[in-house]
Amino acid sequence: MKRVFALRLSTLVLLLCFFVEAIATRQTNFSRQQYEEDFDHLWQNFADDYAYLDQKQTDWNRVREIYRPQISAVKTRNDFVALLESVLEELYDFHTHLNTNTASSPRLVPSGADIWAEWIKERAIIKEVKPESGADKAGLKVGMEIVSINGVAVAAAVSRRAGKSLRFRDKAAKDWALRTLLAGRHNENRSIEVISNGARKVFEIEADSRQAETKPLLTYRRLAKDVGYIRINNSLGNSELVKQFGLALAALRDTRGLVLDLRDTPSGGNTTVARGIMGRFITRDLPYQKHSIPAEERQYGIKRSWIELVSPGAGFTYTAPVVVLVNHWTGSMGEGIAIGMDGMKRATIVGTDMARLAGATSGIKLPHTGIGVTFPTEKLFHVNGTPREKFVPPVYVDLLLEKNVDGDVILLKGLTVLRARIGSRPKRSRS
């Protein structure tokens, strides 16, 4: 009887512990001291390890002076999330973000964006619109000049959104603010006024127009009897993609050229998957990117850097010419594959500038609120020394110059390049 009682008591204790833990994980309110300690934890980690402070106009000490006193107004965890979002925006870095959000959080760029715009001679010009997106369906086009966003003149809106700690508002900060405003917030309808062909027009885009669409990890087909096509559908973080890529490549094994489309990889991925893909195109170890860790140099005065290699993958090697298509929604690890295939001289890269997400990221978790934070701690470079975020495709496509051309301009340009490369090679004999 005592044993039964003891078992019941231990079971009750376990259930009570589970209940207390569950309550703790759902906690939404914390003490001011806890919020301050989490703030200090984030601030110090960035001061120590953020890789790009030397390239920002951000006064990081000033950031602490501006935002830490605002903790006195924080009442809930959601309030604290909003405060930290403002802190991170001071770095105007699309590769830096919280791993949680609220209904009013800004959408991440490029993964949550459908318009890519840039300041050109003091005018906010649309350079690319994501196909089949809310902006595309509303009718926004490349070349349109943005006049206002949600009823606020675009210059004023950008000025308000740019950081408060900046020593100088450089073009990068203004472009960041412009793209962030155009991406909007999760619960926000967008009203975008443009000038097109001399006339003003307002486009209304509902917040729910960007619902996530379920896609396979990749799609593939033949564009012609001798040309294969593989498109990665934002899945570079899924290890299953390596297997699926191998199956697609096997189905296209007899083609004389391949188009690898990375224009839907805004969320990035990991180097394991990337190397698994790139390894199918080489027969020996080759360097594909360079890393450096600025924090180690800041702390010890000694540089640390290294070259990362790709090794041949399992299965057959695809040796025919390859063209890689990129655009502003080619992000992070998609950019890594592009510079890798270029550096290994295994592909011609065709397209616009990419998302220009800087560096390789690491994550921290704030001790009290449990909020995760992702930010770049390593700088990344093409093997020729060019920073990854400054890489320009050798076959550059300026969509502003091609805005009156029908069809998929980047794909058409890629096929032209691929045909030229196929034409310069002898036909392969069948083994």
Image: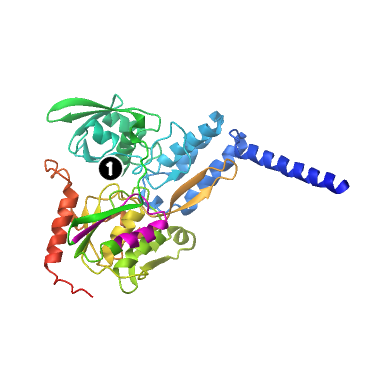
From the top left corner, tell me how far across and down residue 61 is, in percent: 47, 44
From the top left corner, tell me how far across and down residue 231 is, in percent: 28, 53
From the top left corner, tell me how far across and down residue 76 is, in percent: 56, 31
Q: Which of 207 and 250 is in front in this view?
A: 250
The residue carrying pointer 1 sits among few (fewer than 14), some (14 to 19) or many (20 or more) residues within 10 Å by Cα, namely: few
Q: In which quarter of the image is residue 150?
A: top left
Q: Which of 343 and 205 is in front in this view?
A: 205
Is 362 left or right of 4, judged from the image as shown? left
Looking at the image, which residue sits at the far right? 1
Q: Nearer the viewer, residue 253 or 211?
A: 253
From the top left corner, tell me how far across and down residue 85 is, in percent: 45, 38
Identify residue type, mark 1: Lys
- 168 w.r.t. 255: above or below: above
Q: Please give the count of numbered marks on the rendered protein.
A: 1
Is residue 385 in view?
no
Q: In which quarter of the image is the C terminus?
A: bottom left
Query: Which residue occupies 30% across, 64% down?
Result: 250
Query: Which residue occupies 13% across, 61% down?
Result: 419
Is residue 285 in view?
yes
The answer to whether residue 232 is magenta is: yes
What span is in magenta? 227-249
Q: In which quarter of the image is residue 94?
A: top left
Q: Quadrant of residue 378?
A: bottom left
As helix, strand or loop, the secondary structure at mark 1 comes to: helix
Query: Which residue occupies 20% across, 73% down?
Result: 430
The answer to whether residue 241 is magenta is: yes
The residue that label 1 is drawn on is 171
Q: Which of 383 and 191 is in front in this view?
A: 191
